[in-house]
């Protein structure tokens, strides 16, 4: 199975990233987590991205706040899919990161999830890997079925309380 790379611009993003790590663990998907900055360690970030495919990665997740250039900087150096997680900051509640992550130029696509959406980023990475992994695809189908049952149980409780 291909690995998922999770790159964060700062270790202050770790509480957000951990939610995605937990999803990958739940599905048994191998991963690596690193701190590389588009601004402070651009050479290391670039080398990682340009060698990721040869090093067994299938998807890169990039988490960054404020200017949030990390996902785009990584995407510019690889043909692997890159998923950006815009992280909430104190200044603009993450809108700055969201817009920076989603506004990529033609030719440098970055799939973008919600602000602090590491869980969905991990699920999207798993869906990408599941295109060529039937066992992983089955795990996703099972999770969706379990989520459906949980939602219907909640509906039944609410219906019983109010109708």
Image (cartoon, rainbow, N blue to C red):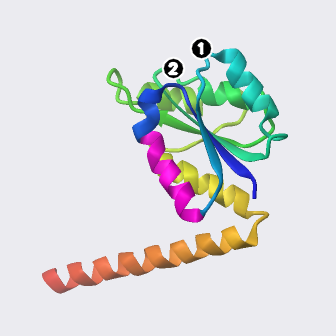
Labels 1, 2: front one:
1
Mark 2: secondary structure: loop
Residue 97: give x, y in percent of width and height: 48, 28
Height in image: 26 above or below 80? below
Residue 39: which numbered mark, if any? 1
Question: Which of the two discs, 1 and 2, labels the residue nearer the N terminus?
Answer: 1
Give how far across and how far down residue 148 sits, in percent: 45, 77
Q: Read off the residue under disc 2.
A: 67
Identify the residue shown where x is 71% and y is 36%: 109
Main secondary-structure element of the magenta-colored stretch: helix
Quadrant the C terminus occupies: bottom left
Residue 99 as seen in the image, left or right of residue 136:
left
For residue 135: magenta? no
Q: Is residue 115 visible?
A: no
Residues at marks 1 and 2 touching, judged by CB atoms closer than 8 Å: yes
Density class for disc 2 (Cα within 10 Å; few <14, some 14-19, many ≥20) is: some
Where is residue 86 drawn, in percent x and y? 49, 34
Query: Which of the 4 quarters of the picture holds residue 75?
Result: top right
Q: Residue at x 75, y 45 (%)?
A: 57
Task: Report if residue 26 lies within the magenta region.
Answer: yes
Query: In the rendered image of this protein, does residue 148 appear above or below residue 42?
Result: below
Query: Which of 56 and 71 lies nearest the eye of the viewer?
Result: 56
Please report the bounds of the magenta region as a residue range. 16-27
- Where is residue 157 shown, x and y percent of the image? 23, 81
Q: Is residue 147 above or below residue 52?
A: below
Residue in the image at 61% along x and 54% along y: 124
Residue drawn 32% across the image and 82% down it? 153
């Amino acid at each position: 199975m291909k690995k998922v790379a999770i790159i964060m611009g700062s270790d202050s993003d770790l509480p957000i990233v951990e939610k995605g790590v937990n999803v990958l663990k739940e599905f048994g998907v191998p991963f690596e987590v690193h701190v590389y900055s588009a601004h402070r360690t651009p050479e290391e970030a670039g080398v990682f991205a340009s060698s990721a495919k040869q090093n067994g990665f299938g998807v890169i997740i990039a988490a960054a706040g404020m200017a949030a250039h990390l996902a785009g900087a990584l995407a510019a150096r690889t043909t692997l899919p890159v998923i950006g997680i815009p992280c909430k900051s104190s200044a603009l509640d993450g809108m700055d990161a969201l817009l920076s992550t989603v506004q990529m130029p033609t030719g440098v696509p970055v799939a973008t999830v919600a602000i602090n959406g590491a869980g969905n980023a991990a699920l999207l990475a798993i869906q990408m890997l599941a295109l060529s992994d039937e066992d992983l695809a089955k795990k996703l189908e099972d999770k969706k079925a379990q989520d459906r049952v949980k939602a219907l149980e909640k509906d039944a409780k609410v219906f019983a309380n109010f109708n």
